[in-house]
Image: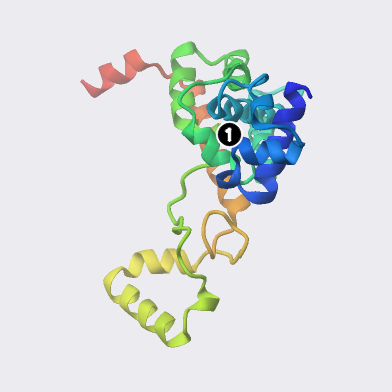
Amino acid sequence: MYGLHLLGAAVVLADEAGIESLSMRRLSQELGVVPMALYKHVASKEELLDGMVDVIVGEIGPAVHDPGWKGAVRARVLSARQALLRHPWARHLLESRTSRTPAVLRYMDDIIAMFLAGGFTVDLTHHVMHALGSRMWGFTQELFDEPATHKSEAEVPPEVQAASFQEMSQRYPNILQVAMAARHDDESVVGQGCDDQVEFEFALDLLLDGFEQLHGRDRSSKRAKEDRG
């Protein structure tokens, strides 16, 4: 049994049963070995989880040969998004890691390289990476996220829904108006009523356009501080 086989089996188990079901004992049962056999390849469950992150990052497509930095970054981010959509649990695993693995660092380095190759200064690239945040991995914390324990509309009696909407319209009319204007997409991870892919690409394009404008103005931290007085 090789390390990559172990990590691949762990990813499959998480896909099928959920990351919360993953344990060294459960994984050893799936592989038909005793639990101690796993520790020849990983020192702990935390190391196993780090390795699983590297497997997911390894699924992200290579940098595309796009003549412009914007197209290259956009394609890489959307490739990362597709990798995470194949493994819905991976988003939370990425967020939970306290250390960055070599695969994670290589991916970040590649993204930074695209901006630098596009003529961005190191200073502006620093701000760009802050602005991208988790979006470079293909996900973001959305405004209209719903708690996992929230009942779907189908499970809520119509009269309760009507009363809830009536109360919302009186107390928070603007929020309700914007939320109800969204396209319906029951499979969205953003929240019922939002088209997840459309919202993600809209925000990504908005950021990339903004980066392009700042790059054209040769924006720097020093100049921004001077303008602020």
How many numbered discs? 1
Nearest the viewer among 157 and 29 is: 29
What residue is rendered at 69% in x and 41% in y?
A: 82
Residue farthest toward the bottom in the current orientation of the protein: 159
The residue under label 1 is 137
Q: Quadrant of the C terminus?
A: top left
Nearest the viewer among 154 and 109 is: 154
Is 52 rendered above or below residue 108? below
Would you identify the image quadrant in which residue 117 lies?
A: top right
Q: Residues within 10 Å of mark 1 (few under 14, many from 20)?
A: many
Would you identify the image quadrant in which residue 138 lies?
A: top right
Residue 38 is left or right of residue 121, and the answer is right
Q: Quadrant of the N terminus?
A: top right
Is 204 rendered above or below residue 68? below
Q: Amino acid at mark 1?
A: Trp
Asked if residue 209 can be seen in this view, the reply is no
Q: Position of residue 186 (x, y in %)?
A: 61, 65
Would you identify the image quadrant in which residue 116 lies?
A: top right
Q: Position of residue 220 (x, y in %)?
A: 39, 16
Is 219 rendered above or below residue 25? above
Residue 162 is left or right of residue 134, and the answer is left
Q: Position of residue 132 (x, y in %)?
A: 50, 32
Regarding mark 1 in the picture, which secondary structure is present there? helix
Nearest the viewer among 54 and 79 is: 54
Asked if residue 227 can be seen in this view, the reply is yes
What residue is rendered at 63% in x and 33% in y?
A: 77
Residue farthest toward the left in the current orientation of the protein: 229
